[in-house]
Amino acid sequence: MKFFNPDYQPALSKAVSEFELQTSTELVVIVTKRSHDYANIAWTAAAICTLIVFSLFMWLEYQFFDDHIYLGTVLTFCLVFALVYAIAPLKKLFTNQKNREHFCQTAAYALFAEQGLYKTKGHTGMLVYVSLFEKSVSIVADRAITDAFGEKGLANIRQEFLDIFKQNEAAPALLKVIQKISPTFAQALPRQADDEDELSNSVPHFLHGGFGAKTFRVKKS
């Protein structure tokens, strides 16, 4: 089972629904192919490679014509930019995990604010943002949840989600983690009689940073 298969979205929606039947936490799960387009990395790599090629034209003893130097530098820039922008392993080559996690966290906080997940009456909204390219997970929780679990508790929960990338298939592992943490949330924030679904049940699609960054948001149907 893969994240973007048609049959996965209903399975994830069901897992979220079952989770919310036990706790007052309003859970939103977002899965994205990537959190950033890394165009800045492609620009940097292209500029460095172009400078190297231009320097070779200048230093080598071979006599190059002006049009060779011009076309060579222009083609180098365009080719390197296109390759780094289009090929995921090259993006990882020019970045580190800390940078990739930063982009993941930034996107998570932006979506938390954009989708109004902070507007629940009990301040119980929580976003689990899973970014596949970065192999990272960001959790953004409202005040009631941070008060109940603290930074250390939320860090432990985040680690549970991060461990899905250690499994052979991350998609079904994500469902299992949601089921696994349900009793913990039920104990810390038990469902109240007057709890209601305050967040939108729609499943919008987002685009972040260019092509291929499709995401989906899952809530109870």
Image: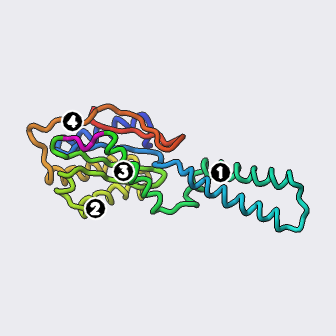
Which residue is rendered at x = 41% and y = 55% of the image? 136
Residue, disc 2: 156
Residue, disc 4: 198
Residue, disc 3: 173
| Quadrant where the image shows the N terminus | top left
Q: Residues within 10 Å of mark 1 (few under 14, many from 20)?
A: many
Disc number placed over residue 81 in the picture, else none: 1
Point out the frontmost of discs 2 and 3. 2
Determine the residue located farthest toward the front in the rendered image.
66
The magenta segment: 116-120
Verify CB contact (< 8 Å) between mark 2 and mark 3: no
Q: CA distance from mark 2 to mark 4?
A: 27 Å
Q: Is residue 115 left or right of residue 136?
A: left
Which residue is rendered at x = 44% and y = 37% of the image? 5
Q: Residues within 10 Å of mark 4 (few under 14, many from 20)?
A: few
Which amino acid, by three-letter code, is at mark 2? Asn
Which amino acid, by three-letter code, is at mark 3? Ala
Dot 4 or dot 1, earlier in sequence: 1
Q: CA distance from mark 3 to mark 4?
A: 27 Å
Q: CA distance from mark 2 to mark 3?
A: 16 Å
Which amino acid, by three-letter code, is at mark 4? Glu
Dot 2 or dot 3, earlier in sequence: 2
Dot 2 or dot 4, earlier in sequence: 2
Q: CA distance from mark 2 to mark 1?
A: 39 Å
Residue 45 visible here = yes
Q: Position of residue 128 (x, y in %)?
A: 32, 49
Q: CA distance from mark 4 to mark 1?
A: 44 Å
Verify CB contact (< 8 Å) between mark 2 and mark 1: no
Residue 1 visible here = no
Q: Is residue 182 left or right of residue 33?
A: left
Dot 3 or dot 1, earlier in sequence: 1
Q: Is residue 182 left or right of residue 169?
A: left
